[in-house]
Structure formats: C-alpha cells, structure tokens
C-alpha cells in the first residue's frame, strides 16, 4: 500500500502546480481607470442575467472555480482520511479521533 503520507505529497505537488498556474495567468489590462469607466457604463446597460452568462462563459473564471473545487476536494479527502490514519497507523482509539462515543 501507499500509506497515508502520499496524501501530503500530493497536496504539496498540487499546491506547486497551482502557484505556477497563478503566475502564468496574463495581466488583463494596463489601464485600470479606463476599465472602471467601461465597466460602469456596461453595467448600466446590461441585465444581471447577461452579466452572469458572461462570467460563466469566461475561461478564466471557470478555470479558477475548477482549481478551487479541486483544492477543497483534496482538503476534504485529507480530513476524511486523517482519522483512519491515526487509528490504523498510530494506534489512537476511535474515540480520540472523533469516530466513537
């Protein structure tokens, strides 16, 4: 078996990939004041439904949301498997790890 330490190694590798990905995202604008004026004008002329559809069709938003989903899924997997590792490998009782009454 792989043991429980592979979960930590996987999280370190995933964190490194996410950090590299964050630095690889290009800068979207060089003039923020112009963008704010255009955004204010655009918000006054579009409906909320159209704004939501634009956000959901954005590759950057969907990619970032996907990254967050995978990060939290990894975290929850670790938190779920941690009591099992403590009981099976370190000899803690199920009561001490939250598994019993």
Image: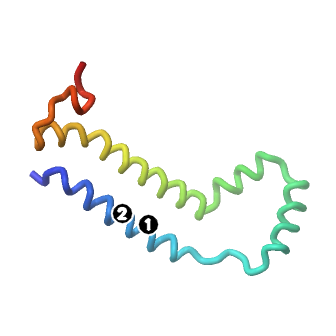
* Outermost residue, bottom side: 30
Question: Would you identify the image quadrant in which residue 18 lies?
Answer: bottom left
Residue that appears at 90% across and 54% down = 44
Label 2 neighbour load within 10 Å: few <14, some 14-19, many 20+: some
- Which residue, given by chain and number where applicable, does mark 1 sit on? 18
Helix, strand or loop status at disc 1: helix
Q: Position of residue 55 (x, y in %)?
A: 68, 55
The spot of residue 98 in percent (x, y) is: 27, 29
Q: Which image quadrant is residue 6 in? A: bottom left
Q: Check contact, mark 1 vs mark 2: CB within 8 A.
A: yes
Cα–Cα gap, marks 1 and 2: 6 Å
Q: Is residue 49 above or below residue 68?
A: above
Q: Regarding mark 2 in the picture, which secondary structure is present there?
A: helix
Front-most of residues 98 and 79 = 98
Q: Residue at x 22, y 30 (%)?
A: 96
Count of numbered tags: 2
Choose between 62 and 77: the one closer to the eye.
Answer: 77
Point 25% across, 54% down: residue: 7
Q: Is residue 6 above or below residue 18?
A: above
Name the residue beneath numbered marker 2. 14
In the shown orientation, is residue 91 left or right of residue 19?
left
Image-quadrant location for residue 26: bottom right
Residue 95 is left or right of residue 29, and the answer is left
Please provide percent x and percent y for residue 92.
Answer: 15, 35
* Residue at image location 19% in from the left, 38% down from the top: 84
Q: Which x, y percent locates residue 43?
A: 85, 56
* The C terminus: image quadrant: top left
Crowdedness near tag 1: few (<14), some (14–19) or many (≥20) residues, C-alpha within 10 Å: some
33 vs 2, left or right, is right
Residue placed most toward the observer, 30 or 93: 93
């Amino acid at each position: 078996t792989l043991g429980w330490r592979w979960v930590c190694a996987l999280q370190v590798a995933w964190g490194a990939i996410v950090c590299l990905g964050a630095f690889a995202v290009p800068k979207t604008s060089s003039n923020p004041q112009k963008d704010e004026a255009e955004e204010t004008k655009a918000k006054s002329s579009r409906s909320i439904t159209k704004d939501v559809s634009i956000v959901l069709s954005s590759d950057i938003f969907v990619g970032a949301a996907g990254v967050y989903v995978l990060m939290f899924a990894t975290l929850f997997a670790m938190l779920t498997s941690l009591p099992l590792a403590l009981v099976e490998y370190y000899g803690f009782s199920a009561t001490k790890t939250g598994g019993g009454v």
